[in-house]
Amino acid sequence: MKKFWNWARDEDSGVRTLYLDGTIAEESWFDDDVTPKAFKADLNAGEGDIVIWINSPGGDCIAASQIYTMLMDYKGKVTVKIDGIAASAASVIAMAGTEVLMAPTALMMVHNPLTIAIGDSEEMQKAIAMLDEVKESIINAYEIKTGQSRAKLSHLMDAETWLNANKAIELGFADGILEDEKKRIQPDDITYAFSRRAVTNSLLNKVKPKIPKQNKGTPVDVAKATPADWLEKRLSLISH
């Protein structure tokens, strides 16, 4: 059975460790082989406190929702440790931690849910409505953990926001910095949140003054296009 999770036990302490390394439900959370039931069986195969190491770009938001719920319902303490990245759906799972710790070099990313839809305008409207509801459900998890307003959380998701460890702690997504057993790490005052939209708009504002004016509706001659023309075209595509 191919799983996207792996359990290990420390023979000395008895603490069980769950590793989520890679895409959440890369194949399918609803395959005959990879099921929520199988994950729950593994989770409940033992008891006591557990540690969850996360290094994942995200994946299936339904799988993340079910894992989040199972972990929230788990009787023992759940310590989440992010050593690389907890992005998208993986950030939702992280919110189930009784304590969430991030490596000084780790990142967390939150953004709006995505899907693919095919059909007429009615089908497109249904897809939009579905995404709106999925977003609200994700905000529920973020709100419970962070205590931030739904409006602020929605804005962070709209902007596709990347958080370093200190910024995640500042906003309530994390509780502390992972410590080296050999040396205690002291968080500094440097925090940042990287927004893809903000960077795109900033680059466009710098490029536009250098681009020659064209008549409205006149296409750019590809053969004569300058690097600035090409950059503006590419940035405009990813900023909408």
Image (cartoon, rainbow, N blue to C red):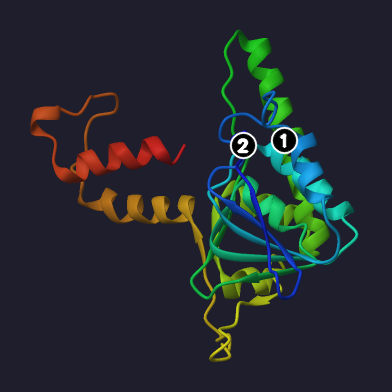
At 83% across and 56% down in the image, what residue appears?
Answer: 46
Counting residues from the N terminus, which is met first, the one under dot 2 or under dot 1?
Answer: 2
Residue at which label 1 appears: 62
**Left or right: 97 in relation to 47:** left
Amino acid carrying label 2: it is Ala
At 62% across and 42% down in the image, what residue appears?
Answer: 112
Q: Quadrant of the N terminus?
A: top right
| Residue 9 visible | yes
Q: In terms of depth relative to the viewer, which is nearer, 236 or 180?
A: 180
CA separation in Å, label 2 and label 1: 9 Å
The residue tagged with tag 1: helix, strand or loop? Answer: helix
Mark 2 against mark 1, which lies toward the viewer? 2
Q: Tell me where residue 228 appears, x and y as whole percent.
A: 20, 45
Residue 133: which quarter of the image? top right
The residue sitting at the left extreme is 224
**Position above or below: 92 against 176:** above
Are discs 2 and 1 less than 8 Å apart at CB?
yes
Residue at which label 2 appears: 25
Q: Within 10 angstroms of label 1, few (less than 14), some, or many (20 or more) residues?
A: some
Q: Tell me where residue 27 appears, x and y as whole percent.
A: 57, 30
**Position above or below: 47 against 136:** below
The residue sitting at the front extreme is 11
**Left or right: 200 in relation to 120:** left
The residue sitting at the top extreme is 120
